Image (spheres, rainbow, N blue to C red):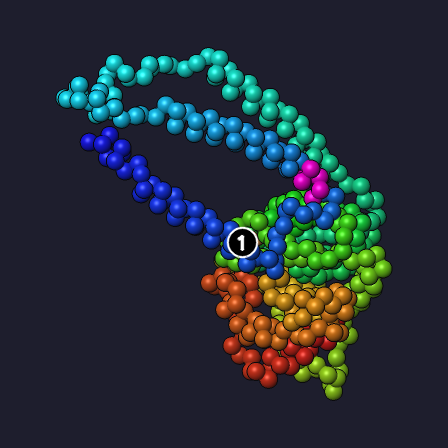
Amino acid sequence: MIGERAAGSSGRPLWRRLRLVLIALGVALALTACADEHPLDTLTEAGPDAREINDLFFPVLGVAIVVFFLVQGAVIYLAVRYRVRRKAASEAAADPGGDDLYGDDEYPEQVHGNLRLELAWTIIPTILLAVISVFALISLVELNEVSAAEDDLRVTVVGQQWWWEFQYHLDGDTSTPPDIVTANELVIPVYQQVPLEITSRDVIHSFWIPRLNGKRDAVPGRTHPWVIEADETGRFLGQCTEFCGLSHAYMRMYAVVLTPAEWEEWVQGQVIDAAPLEEGDPGYEGQEVFLANCANCHVVNGVTDVNLDGVLDGTEDYAGANSTTSALVAGAAPNLTHVASRTTFAGSIFDLYEDRAERIPYLEVAERGDLNRGDLEAWIRNAPERKANDADGARGMTAFPGLTEGDIDALVEYLMTLR
Ligand code: CUA
């Protein structure tokens, strides 16, 4: 019975099912093209570390393709060559009560193992993997090599549900308070290796900017060294790659690579504090709204007055990983001192300016960009509606139902003064 059905259904239905799979594959491939605006592209490297990885990846991929076709080819060949065949009509007629497929005397010889074959398919992969592992180990060592001098720029990267903080130590000394604290956009000079120290304030995240280097975990209570280096300018998308809660997928970032001259200019702009606005200054009302509502978590250097040392060096307990009740802590939200100089917000999931596509130079967006007011105001009004949040409000930005539309307009005006 079973044999009959299998033999009878070996025609069209299988092909129809195959056709469905092929169509699904085609649609999936076509849909991947929709992601072209935010490519997490591992194949076109933009720096020496990513090149190191690709120089390992492509040869290994080549070997894997050869092995794949040899093995799958052999499997398919053997399956077809030695498949069960229906008896010829004359044979079946000669044996009316017999098996429809083949008689007992034709049953294939049953063997247990084949020493030569098994030795071959154990030894060949072992040699192959041993060779690959030598090259992989060399790459691993080279990826962890720090060539930057002790007093060169060093950046502490802090992962937090669900955004990234970057603390710049311009003199390379990470034991002193950072010179610049910014969020979501890691601005670095081209052709300069920047050593990173990666950590987390809450759960385990993973730092990854695929066009510049591989991944490194951000683990609370530990710092993992990593480096980043680019040999072309531009913006390179990054993404948290360790599942870290509801908005893990919305924990993005950019590496922004500037020329050395632009980088110097950026640093000069970032190291200065914001000046507190006086009554009558444009944005003053917004500053009042900010101080009353936002300054509990967000810092504007020179305006909000909190001691950040504990938060920045990790000694102060910020909403511990196991706690669902801890309060938010001042400083443990994106530092907004120069928020208008950035091109994205909320874990880099929204553009701060409408016309980034026109490729305004990074240093000029605050001056020349058209504010993406819709997303920014919606975010201030009710952030959890735009980006999934922790139910008890102890993670991510909370909603502000008490703010009037006038407050929000004032707030946006104030934020735009923070260049
Ligand atoms: Cu942070 Cu996933």
List the single residue furthest toward the bottom.
280
Tag 1: residue type? Thr
Between 198 and 37, the residue placed more toward the observer is 37
Magenta stretch, main secondary structure, is helix
Left or right position of 86 against 384: left
Residue 411 image-quadrant placement: bottom right
SS for dot 1: helix
Report the residue at 69% width, 47% height from top. 45
Relative height, residue 194 to residue 412 (above, below): above
In this rendering, the count of numbered labels is 1
Residue 276 image-quadrant placement: bottom right
Specify start and end residues of the magenta stretch as a single range: 50-55
Between 185 and 201, the residue placed more toward the observer is 185
Between 299 and 384, the residue placed more toward the observer is 384
- Crowding around mark 1 (Cα neighbors within 10 Å: few <14, some 14 to 19, many 20+) is few
Relative height, residue 146 to residue 98 (above, below): below
Quadrant of the rendering where the C terminus is positioned? bottom right
Q: Which residue is mark 1?
A: 32
Is 51 one of the magenta-colored residues? yes
